[in-house]
Image: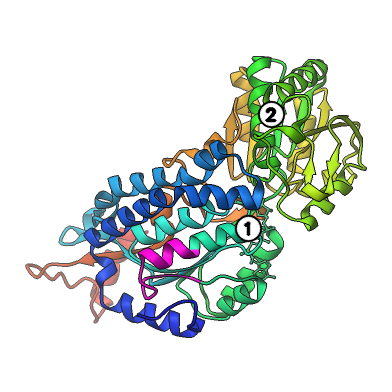
Amino acid sequence: MINTESSNIGDIIQNQREFFQTGKTKDVNFRIQQLQRLKEAIIEHKQEIIQALQADLHKPELETYLTEIVVIKEIDYAIKYIKSWTKPKKTELSFDFFSYSAHIYPEPLGVVLIIGTWNYPFQLTISPLVGAIAAGNCAIIKPSEIASHTSSIVAKIIRKYFQTAYIAVVEGGIEASQKLLAEKFDHIFFTGGTAVGKIVMAAAAKHLTPVTLELGGKSPCIVDTNINLEHTARRITWGKFINAGQTCIAPDYLLVDKKIKKDLIDELKKCLKEFYGENPANSPDYARIISQKHFDRLVKFLEDGKAIVGGETKSSERYIAPTLIDNVSLENSVMQEEIFGPILPIIEYTDIAEAIALINSRPKPLALYLFSHNKNLQKRVLQETSSGGVCLNDTMMQFGTSSLPFGGVGDSGIGNYHGKASFDTFSHNKSVLQNSFWLDLKWRYAPYKSKLPLIKKLLG
Ligand code: NAD
């Protein structure tokens, strides 16, 4: 069996194509076994996964369970439903098709590429893999080089439990990514920033390869007056500062009704103390920024507006305190770029129309949050804005349910995954129409002349 470490990318793809041609991956029982194997591999190596995430992001163990190892729930979900997902589905036909039957057969695409990112570096590479396996594909995974410890453990696990001709890992940075992108795949699943997403899509276009792009953007969080203040503050604090704000669906900035702004800020301050103590630098529950480059990028944002909480940084540790900033201008860079760090600008509005107009003046976000009991307001925001997903009265939890497709719209992404959506992403729905031999009406065959009046009558 060919070894990923010493083989070139072309050989790996060729071997995977040959393995796919054997038809083995089309067997549903084979897929279930491979999903079970993946789950066992994760459970067996969970201590190493925890250590890798600690080394890459100072990720607390509980967060690693909740946001990385939790991917085993996706595996369980796929195992539970795979038999119904793979079954051909009968479709309805109109009366003129009375002698036919019609079915949709989901079939695997072939050899797919999964390019991962660094912020949830384990789950964001393994979760798409679950879909690729469930749908019956071979896969090559390229984890992010920036979370290098996690990249190593992903490679170690996959190489130990799977043949390279079925699932392979190619480690490396931009160069490795570009070598992979030069090849023809049957699907490319990419998670990362919008700029690289465009590079991936351009490379895929050369081979007419379909893509799923899981990108980012600025996800707004609207806070109305009609709320439970304590719950709201706690849920925002958690969603914003988990993983030190390096979450694609973290609330990027707050849009707060002016009447409740002061109370909300007081409550957020209380939560921050409750979560991370007087000095979050000493908290075992607070992560660090992934790299010096991202640290420097974030420190620049601290020049915008006025830090009312936090603002402290420690370059040697890549530590940035959880920070709330007020008096921000919409022209400031912190309000122009995705923050992707522990800095939360607070912007007030007097009428919800202003908040909606601001959201609609910008690229469509990956997530939108609204805290409000008010059903009419909920309806209005849902109707008047567009985003990849929405979570009402909470943050981030929409990512955690396998029954909801997860993905962006517009600049925040193309396509979606999780649960059945992952299976669909990595499948082709083959339409199969069958006629029978008991009758052969001649209305569609030449010579046409005598049949035209009837066709005209039927079709106007
Ligand atoms: P990154 O730098 O790790 O890049 C992602 C992947 O692209 C890596 O595997 C990297 O090797 C590769 N890559 C980087 N530059 C490339 C190039 N020029 N050509 C080819 N491949 C290249 O991650 P990032 O882009 O910094 O990721 C952060 C972004 O990801 C944020 O915008 C965040 O919102 C988004 N994100 C989205 C999701 C989601 O599910 N939608 C999840 C996490 C992160």
Q: Nearer the viewer, residue 248 or 290?
A: 290
- Whether residue 393 appears in magenta in the rendering, the answer is no
Q: Is mark 2 on a helix, strand or loop?
A: helix
Residue 162, position in %: x, y? 36, 67
Residue 192, position in %: x, y? 64, 58
Report the quarter where the C terminus lies: bottom left
Q: How far apart are marks 2 and 1 (CA)?
A: 25 Å
Q: Check the image and report above or below for 270 versus 94.
A: above
Tell me the quadrant of ligand 1: bottom right
Left or right of 135 on screen, residue 441 = left
Q: What stretch is highlighted in magenta?
A: 155-169
Q: Nearer the viewer, residue 92 or 242?
A: 242
From where the camera sits, is residue 386 visible?
A: no
Q: Tell me the residue that label 2 is attached to.
A: 237
Q: Nearer the viewer, residue 147 or 142?
A: 147
Question: Crowding at label 1, few (<14), some or many (≥20) Cα neighbours within 10 Å?
Answer: many
Q: Tell me the residue that label 1 is attached to.
A: 147
Q: Which amino acid does label 2 sit on?
A: Thr
Q: Which of 434 and 343 is in front in this view?
A: 343
Q: In which quarter of the image is residue 294?
A: bottom right
Q: What residue type is labelled 1?
A: Ala
Q: Answer yes or no: disc 1 within 8 Å of ligand 1.
A: yes
Q: Name the image colouring.
A: rainbow
Furthest residue in direction left, as rendered? 438
Q: What element carries label 1?
A: loop
